[in-house]
Image (cartoon, coloured by chain):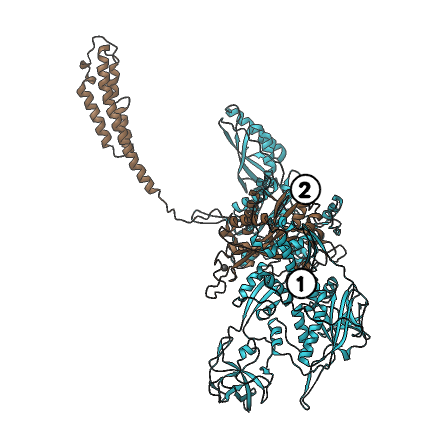
Amino acid sequence: MSAPNKSYDPVEVEALKPEVVEQARDGAIAAFAAAADLDELKQAKVAHTGDRSPLSLANREIGALPPQAKAAAGKLIGQARGAVNQALAKRQAELEAERDARVLVEEAVDVTLPYGRVPRGARHPLTTLAERIEDTFVAMGYQVASGPEVEAEWLNFDALNLHADHPARSMQDTFFVEAPDGTADSGIVLRTQTSPVQIRAMLAGEPPLYAVSPGRVYRTDELDATHTPVFRQVEAIAVDEGLTFGHLKGTIEVLVEKLIGGGLELRWRPSYFPFTEPSAEIDLQCFVCRGASVGNPDRPCRTCSSEGWIELGGCGVVNPRVLVAAGIDPNRYSGFAFGLGLERILMNRHNVADMRDMVEGDVRFTLPFGMEI
Amino acid sequence: MRVPLSWLREYVDLPAGETGRDVAARLVRAGLEVETVEQLGTDIKGPLVVGEVLSIEELPGFKKPIRHCFVNVGNANGTGEPQEIVCGATNFRVGDKVVVILPGGVLPGPFPISARQTYGRTSAGMICSARELGMGDDHNGIIVLPPEFEAGTDAIELLQLVDEVLDIAVTPDRGYCLSMRGVAREAAAAYGLPLADPALLDVPPANSYGYLVKVADPVGCDRFVARTVTGVNPAAQSPIWLQRRLQKSGIRPISLAVDITNYVMLEVGQPLHAYDRERVDGPIQVRRAADGETLTTLDGVKRKLSAEDLLICDNSGPIGLAGVMGGATTEILEPVYDPETGVVTGSTEIIIEAAHFEPVAIARSAKRHKLPSEASKRFERGVDPEATRAAAQRAVDLLVLIAGGTAEAGVTDIAAPRPVRTITIDAGLPDRVAGAEYGRETVTRRLQEVGCGVVGADVLEVTPPSWRPDLTDPYDLVEEVVRLEGYDNVPARMPITPPGRGLSEAQRFHRRVGVALAGAGYVEINAYPFVGEAAFDGLGLDADDARRRTVKLVNPLNDAEPALRTTLLPGLLGALRRNVGRGNTDLALFETGTVFLPKAEPKVAPRLPVDRRPTEEQLAELDAALPDQPRRVAVALTGERLPSGWWGKGAPSGWADAIEAARTVAAAAGVELTVRQAQYAPWHPGRCAELLVGDEVVGHAGELHPRVIKALHLPERTSAMEIDLDLVFEDGRRVSGPPVSAYPVATQDVALIVDAGVHAADVEAALREGAGELLESLRLFDVFTGEQAGEGKKSLAYTLRFRAADRTLTADEASAARESAVAVAAERTGAVLRGA
Ligand SMILES: [Zn+2]
């Protein structure tokens, strides 16, 4: 590089002559355009923009120019380099796009290949159904209560107003636990209903009490398409000041709407349970045929057996005797309770035809239910 | 209770167009469980007429008797000529009146009738049996009608073939609905129509010259009415209307006297018993049995009696199990027809018993002798003691009317005094319980409809009717008012609940376990908890294994499985085997549920009072008698855990998956799980892990013992895990957020040679301790044995990642930490750096 010199004339410097600069610029642009791939472009880049390239060398000469000449020379070189870099960037982008397109085509796969590498599991539909019902009640302010499956007779029967000779006690076919002396007088049974949980909840504290209790219960039925000796119930109990049969109806209406859907008629049939009075059986209008199958043999309905109604469960106003046994003042508090059979709801809500499917644990039955129903 | 609609209409003037379904819907809403409405006779099409048998020609040469008959069917066939019919039945004679279906008619089946050639003759119609007409399946022969009916008369109406029958399941509190009288009362109330009460009869007053009856147990028997009828014609048969009503009600007609007692029982709900007076020895006595006494009941079974049984006796001893079943020695004799003389012999002198027995005594006797009868069913649920006289009168009237008997003037009626029951009820209680506005007048009116006497205004004194023993307290009356006003008419509203607290920590944990395991590929099952010795034998448990101590059932469904599970494995492995048997080979199953562990010294749970809250001590005693019922989760695996595919090789499931499932559960609980080598049935002694939280063993996992796999017919290498959720769960756990350093990580690998018997967990623990707090994480990335590791040795290769919270670590610092880690491992486990 030459030292700064006031009398130095850029025109006299060969490398800074406009035609030389233009030639270098055009040569670079042509070289870039001619590059067939990114490697050739890289070589052209070194040749035309590297330290030893004509334009870089010319640029160095500017430093030696007199101040009045520097601006014009700088502008000349700057414009040339700008054009060169632009051309380089453009070609670079073009070639990269070409390469990417080629590689992406090469990398294409068949995305329809099956991939069962991570096996999926499932929860039992009765479990998730119970949780769904629990959640509905929890949202209404209830707590979820539970109790033992092997239960004291006092809690399963006596406290629920079913004394030893009560005819209703023979309605329920009970598994009795063997006493130490080998007899049936252990005072312990497999609970026939989840109602003892309600007694436990009442014994545990003062009202207000709002509790829902899902769980397994036992009756001495042989397993067949519609019976199982081990099945699941969900019961709810509310004890508070001023609770009425009307509150029971409202609560069940909310549950049914959440669980099955809206717009279905409920039928409240007077019935008999020792632990409630008044007592009712709740029937839900068949959500499949909406009653159209009744007396209409041409349109039979499997869901309701052409009855038009599906039995949901039993309910009623808690018998004051039950409150007394649980230490609750029946003159101050009243309550309501109801119980539903989960298997029957599952059969209806999900078109399960055979009780045995819920019992046998065949994964082909359970898997489609996944994590939620 | 089966209720023929035609019969019901006799007591309630139901609207003419009302169908069985309409009536059923009303009764259902009043609380009667009408299970079905049967349509009778809809599948029969006439002409079905009375025929008179004119001639019978036996056709020989066939395998069974065949008769060719000419039958007079009046003008029913359009010609008035005798009808030619071939018939296979033989229980009729020339001159008998029979039921004939003519060509063009249809019998249930459907079985259309046409004239045809058979057995070489023309048969234009058919002589019908009761079964063919759908009247009941008890008669094999054809129907022979009483002679008074004229040939050609329409038999569909004559035999009352067309009807509707409501089948009602009666709940225990509504014993009175086990009668036409009771159902009619409900129908009358449901329609707002008057009731023609069949028990409102003129009955002569009791007197001293009736049949002698001594009641020694006025508690067990508080009413005994006896009437006598003399000169009954044993040849008399039940008329068609009576037989048909019994048949439609599901009771088989037997003989006139028995049919009448059954009929009156159905009509007014009072079980009756008829004795042949000539077979009764002296006065009738009612008393409890003496131990060792025996009685042969009507069904021919000789029964050993117990001191609790209430008996009807005469001088000879027991002649009936009160309210349950009569005895064989005094029953009405079946009429016997002597074809030589044409004379029918049988009982002619009859005693009718209409008594009222204590429900519990009858229930226990029926249960003890396994003899649930129509009578005991009613007595158990409570019958109307005031209907005894009317019921006896009705039976006497029918015997006189139908059998030509004479009612004797004596009327025995022994009645123990009955206290008048009254219930005091606040007239506003029904409104408050229902949440509706009925008002006093409605409450009073509804109670009167039920049959109650009601006096008072704001506070009502209510006297329930004699047929409603179930009405004992104010809430019973509330139910009557609300149901008759209609449950559907109670306005629905929502309670205002206190703020909810959501699920408990334990409940959230139980849900997490299920979600985590299902997310890890496990499928949930629910097995029955019943097990037997075979299950424990299959698991290879020692004779003194604690899991063989079980809670036992007195009445198991299957005698081979009399106990409750003490481990989830039998049910889970059973489900696994069932799946494999059905071709599901790659399986990962889980179950959560309770096991049942008997107390060290099992006790009897006390029967506490119900008229007040038990004390805390009493409740504690109750709970102490129950077995422990911890909640567990178990998994079982077989086949491929990760399937092979186009992506490469899969992986079979094994002991490590089972242990990993336990880690999944521990992670759901947020607790640290320690894994220790152990030996525990039913696991493979070299492939079994003991699972600990802190110092407590919470479960086991690993591959099952090959012997167990063989015994239980499981696929090879089946693995399993069982862990106690109650022990794993820690209430009130809260995670502290860890500091996250942004300084760079320094990674160092280390390969150690240890004795083959050294546990990786011990090596890892030593490395961690030696590496100190700069160690961020440690991962075992390779294990191998063989020549390169040396005889009896194995190589463990780890990646150690170091990081400081406050600075970039120098290479020297990282190396120093690594060396320190190796040093501790060397000291604790004898580890040697590979290549060193
Ligand atoms: Zn339907």
- Crowd rating for badge 1 (residues with CA inside 10 Å; few <14, some 14–19, many 20+): many
Q: Is residue A369 above or below residue B167?
A: above
Q: Chain of mark 2?
A: A
Res A205 label: 2
Front residue of this view, candidates B361 and B742 = B361
Give the residue drawn at x 59%, y 83%. B144
Left or right: B833 as drawn, with respect to B349: left
Q: Quadrant of residue A3?
A: top left
Q: Chain of mark 1?
A: B
Kindly tell me whether residue A224 is visible in this rendering: no
Give the residue type at disc 1.
Answer: Gly
Callout 1: SS = helix
Q: Which chain is cyan?
A: B
Callout 2: SS = loop
Q: Is residue A21 above or below residue B366?
A: above
- Answer yes or no: do the residues labelled 1 and 2 have beta carbons within 8 Å? no
Q: CA distance from mark 1 to mark 2?
A: 38 Å
Q: Quadrant of residue B497?
A: top right
Front residue of this view, candidates B785 and B179 = B179
| Disc 1: which residue | B175
Q: Which chain is brown?
A: A
Front residue of this view, candidates B652 and A252 = A252
Front residue of this view, candidates B649 and A95 = A95
